[in-house]
Image (cartoon, grey):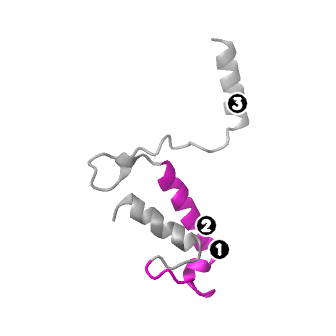
Amino acid sequence: MDRVTVLRHLRAWADGVDPSTGQVLPSDHPGQRPETLRVIFAAVALLEVAPDTATPGSGRAFAPGPRNAGRPWSKDDDVGLATDFDAG
């Protein structure tokens, strides 16, 4: 399954629609649970920003970035960065 198809299915589920039938998902469907929807929206966001080279079978690996990307800096990290910057 290619990335475009995966995104189309995920967006349908995020909209509360069965991607295979086009019918609205019943309220008791697992895809209607808040935790499931959070996962779906996160997956869509990740797939929308990932380069096309990350698609399966492309022969290229997708490097997600530094391990600590997106994490807040500690006070010590902030001070160390400012000190090193001021020192040139």
Asked if the residues shown at circle 1 and circle 2 are in contact, with their CB atoms under 8 angstroms apart, the answer is: yes
Determine if the magenta segment contains residue 35.
Answer: yes
Q: Using the numbered discs, state the Cα–Cα distance from disc 2 to disc 3 in whole angstroms.
A: 31 Å
> Magenta residues?
20-49
Image depth: mark 3 or mark 1 in front? 1
Percent across and percent down for residue 55 are 35, 53
What x and y, as percent, mark residue 41? Answer: 58, 63
Q: Secondary structure at mark 1?
A: helix
- Mark 3 is on which residue type? Asp
Q: CA distance from mark 3 to mark 1?
A: 36 Å
Residue drawn at point x = 56 percent, y = 60 percent: 42
Residue 65 on image: x %, y %: 48, 41
Per the image, the residue denoted by label 3 is 78
Q: CA distance from mark 1 to mark 2?
A: 6 Å
Q: State the SS at label 3.
A: helix
Point out residue 4 in the picture as x, y percentages from the top left corner. 41, 60
For badge 1, the amino acid type reads: Pro
Is 33 or 22 nearer to us in this picture? 22
Q: Residue at x 67, y 25 (%)?
A: 80
Q: Which residue is mark 1?
A: 34
Q: Circle 2 sits on which residue?
A: 38
Q: Is residue 14 above or below residue 74?
A: below
Q: Is residue 68 left or right of residue 75?
A: left
